Amino acid sequence: MEKKTKQPAAKTPPAPLSMTGLAKASGVSPKTVRTYIDAGLLPPPEKKRGTTAYYDARCVNMINMIDRFHSKYSLPLPIIRQVIDEIGHEKALEESGELTKKLNRAKKMPWFEHIVDANSKPFLTKKALILATGLSPKDLDKAIAQKLIMPDKNGLFCKNDMDLALLLSQLKGTGAGKEKILLDFLNMQLQMTESLVEKEFNAFFKNIINKNITVEDANELAEKAIDVLTTLLPLCYRQLLNRKIEELRKT
């Protein structure tokens, strides 16, 4: 009598996850997951139980990939959406390598090279900035009123505005009590930087008026000053802050 060959047991697909479950499994904040859902980056929920929607568990890998390209490489959400729409949600879930390849290609495209240039002209509308960063319209309006974010005369925003909006969006997720302190801190940093820029500009302007240097020379020196500050400021800041903390501990 022939022995029956045991058929391998069919793998049970992982149970669908709520938005909170997706956030826990991916290590991304629930607010960020909500932003990605609202931007149409994830497929529709598989089912709903009451008011809670449940999503394919494979969305966890997709969220991690989206977050990497959006947070680390500043790839705008509308561009990520374009890539996902081109592939289709199901294929994006099944073939993560294909999605990664296409997102990498988008990151290297000429238009993105233009976007990541700190000196690039404003290119984002208000709606696009909100979609790209997850910052709410109310918080964006507040940041504009405080001159943290400054659109041009046409209401368009540049790469620096996008970076600041991303930072503000991240600060919003820090939890009750901390948010106001961090926003006050950001305002203080802006005022200090503004004072530094004014002094630097006045020094260059005086030398240009006195014909000690040309406008081109001033621009070149300013660019070099930015490179020096980028390296020097964090080092000095950390050193002085540690000194103050040590003094506080000794009191």
Image (tube, grey):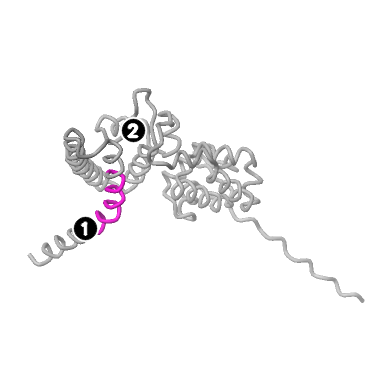
Give the residues in magenta: 222-236
Q: Residue at x 41, y 49 (%)?
A: 29
Q: Quadrant of residue 49?
A: top right
Q: Quadrant of residue 143?
A: top left
Quadrant containing the N terminus in the rendered view: bottom right
Please, what secondary structure does the residue beneath circle 2 have? helix
Q: Main secondary structure of the magenta part?
A: helix
Q: What's the amino acid at mark 1?
A: Cys
Quadrant containing the C terminus in the rendered view: bottom left
Q: Looking at the image, which is closer to me, 216 or 111?
A: 216
Q: What's the amino acid at mark 2?
A: Leu
Badge 2 density bin: few <14, some 14–19, many ≥20, Cα 10 Å: many
Residue reaching furthest right? 1
Badge 1 density bin: few <14, some 14–19, many ≥20, Cα 10 Å: few
Q: Looking at the image, which is closer to me, 94 or 216?
A: 216
Horizontally, is 3 left or right of 46 in the view?
A: right
Q: Are marks 1 and 2 in contact (CB under 8 Å)?
A: no
Look at mark 2 in the image and give the residue it sits on. Answer: 140
Q: First in sequence, mark 1 or 2: give its number.
A: 2
Per the image, is 234 magenta? yes
Please, what secondary structure does the residue beneath circle 1 have? helix
Q: Residue at x 11, y 64 (%)?
A: 247
Give the spatial CA distance, label 1 vs label 2: 31 Å
x then y, percent, for residue 146: 24, 33
Q: Looking at the image, which is closer to me, 33 or 83?
A: 83
Look at mark 1 in the image and give the residue it sits on. Answer: 236
x then y, percent, for residue 157: 38, 32
x then y, percent, for residue 156: 39, 28
Q: Residue at x 25, y 48 (%)?
A: 178
